[in-house]
Structure formats: structure tokens, C-alpha cells
Image (spheres, rainbow, N blue to C red):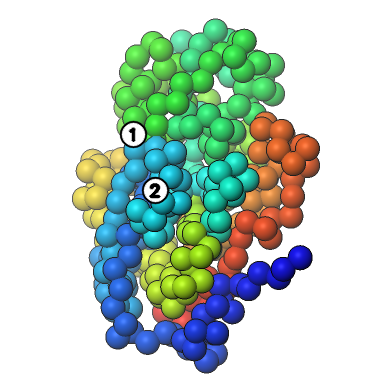
Amino acid sequence: MKKLLTLGTALILAGCASTPSTPPPPNDQVTLRVNVFRGASNLPIYMAQEKGYFARRGITLQMLFTPNSTEQRTGLAQGRFEIAHAAVDNTVAMIEVAKADAVIVAGGDGGMNEVLVRQDINKISDLRGRTYVVDAPNTAYALISRKLLKDAGLKEGVDYKLDPLGGSEARTKGLDTPAGAATLLNPPWNFLAKERGAKSLGRTVDLFGPYQAQGVFVMRPWAAKNAPALERYLAAYIEGCRAAQDPSQRTLALQVLTRELKLTPQVAELTYTELMTRGSGLSKDCAFDMQGFRNVLALRAEIEGQWGGKAPDPARFIDLSLYNRALGHARP
């Protein structure tokens, strides 16, 4: 089998670094298009913008918002943008289902999801005969939902149906109608849904367990050709994550959340608290949670029946070499 070079090796071969602790030259200006869902998980990016971390590394950032994961996966594969932030199971789907040469290059958070339902539902088994709204039915958080419904004794397509409504913003509105009985939501949308009358049946970290949710993924050929730029991006992202988690910058983080997500001060406070919650919120330095990712793969194997029901080696989906290099020169 042909051995694949890591992205870090590609950077060294390009002659752009001498040691893991040496940052790439800052005078090489680059514009990067970054595709995200609108939500609290973007706080490290917002903070990096606010503090000028991308600019000082020669990066002009263009943030693009996706309505759903299908559009995001397709857009990344077609080169409509260079970097995606979302649940990393989307990368697995790109590689295994769409046969796209994508790769996960950094982590982010544990999802911060809650099961939100209409007021007449008291337990997951009450969803018999109802509709559960999801982003896409065969990736990421929908797989957690299907697992919870399965464990409650409900059979998909027989006892309940899925409605692929799109991202969290759309699903929040979906709960306003009787057709949308339940969904998974993360901040700030879970809090907004509760303000509109929804109630929670629990957090997925408690109902399911550790989960590597939001992360950074790119197309592998692009990363190999643009390793210096990606390393600089990841260094600024790490710095933004540190700023987001720095207690001394809490006031600024709340201001950024309020402004970017158009939140009330109360919802911004609740959202910030979730982001700081260990195990489901932001990981330290937006690091990758390997155990959480093993759960991602095991879930896909069980619910989608991939790989004969046995999860594969995580190494085939990830390359953290540039993240580790960036960690070496990211500022405290």
C-alpha cells in the first residue's frame, strides 16, 4: 500500500518550516473561505477575528454560513470554500459514502446538544407516531438521535419518521409546528427553543456519552498544497479558542456572542456557560477528542451498518500534524 504523507510532512517538503516551534512567515497574505453553521461553536473564530489573530498571520477570513450539512459537504468537495467547521462525522460521510478525499485536521467541542421536544412529550418513547426533525438523516447528530430512539424501542420508518429540515436555526423554528415533535439543538438554539415553549429531555453527553462534534476539516489535496496557510489558520484558531476560554476575557466573549448571534444578555450568558462546560463545550485549545471520535465511528457502524458493524481505525480519517505544529507556536 502506498504510504500517505502527513500534512506536516508536506509543509516541510515545501520548505516552509524548520522546526515544529517556528511559525510560518507572516508576510505571505492569503484569503481563506471558511464555511460554518451559525451557532455558538464559532466563538473561537469570532474571538480570533476580534483579537486580530488571523490578520497578524496574514490571513483574510471570509466566513460563509451553510443552511445544512449536505450543502456544506458538497461545497467543500467542489472547492467553493477551503475550510469547513461542523460535526466531524460529516468528514467520515464524505470519505466513506461520497468517496471524497477529505481529512479532519482539528477538534473543537463536544456538541453541547440537548433533546428538545414539544410540551406533550415526557420521554423519548412518547415519540411513537411522531416526526423527529434533523439536519441530514445519515450523519452526525441525527445518528445520535436515531440511537436514542432505537434504545427507547422505536423503529425508524415504522414508529417514527425523520424530517431533514436543515441546521439548528431551521430546526428551532420546526418545533413551533405540531409536525416537528423533537430534535437535537445546541446553543444558542436550545435556549431559544425553550423560550418558545420546548422542553428538554436531557443532554446528549449524559444520554449518549462523549462525542467529538465540531471540528475542522478540509480536502486533503488542498491541504497538502497549502499546508503553510492551513497551519497559520489553525494557530489563529487555537489562539481564538484560548481567548474564548480565558476568564479574563469573559466580558468580551459575551459581547461577541451577543453581537454575532443577536442574543439577549441572558441567552448569551447561558450560551457562554455551555461553551465552558467540560466534556460537552469547547475542548482545551480546541483539541481533538479521540475517545469521542471512537464513539462517532462506533455509532455510525451501529446505526448505518457501515464497515460490517465494526468501527475502523480512526487514523484513516484524521491528520493532526499541522494542528500539532500550530500548537507549538500559537501564543498563550
The residue located at (48%, 15%) in the rendering is 131
Q: Is residue 321 above or below residue 87?
A: below
Label 1 to label 2: alpha-carbon separation: 20 Å
Q: How many marks?
A: 2
The residue located at (71%, 42%) in the rendering is 298
Q: Amino acid at mark 1?
A: Glu
Q: Amino acid at mark 2?
A: Gly
The residue located at (56%, 72%) in the rendering is 7
User: Which secondary structure lies at badge 1?
Assistant: helix
Q: Is residue 300 above or below residue 158?
A: below
Where residue 251 sits, quadrant-wise, is bottom left
Numbered label attached to residue 313 = none
Q: Tell me if I can see residue 163 in this picture.
A: yes
Looking at the image, residue 329 sits to the left or right of residue 208; the answer is: left
Q: Which residue is mark 2?
A: 75
Q: Which residue is mark 1?
A: 169
Marks 1 and 2 in Cβ contact (< 8 Å): no
State which quarter of the image contains the C terminus: bottom left
State which quarter of the image contains the N terminus: bottom right
- Residue 292 location (% of width, % of height): 64, 50
- Residue 208 location (% of width, % of height): 64, 36
Dot 1 or dot 2: first in sequence order is 2
User: Which secondary structure lies at badge 2?
Assistant: helix
- Residue 99 location (% of width, % of height): 58, 48
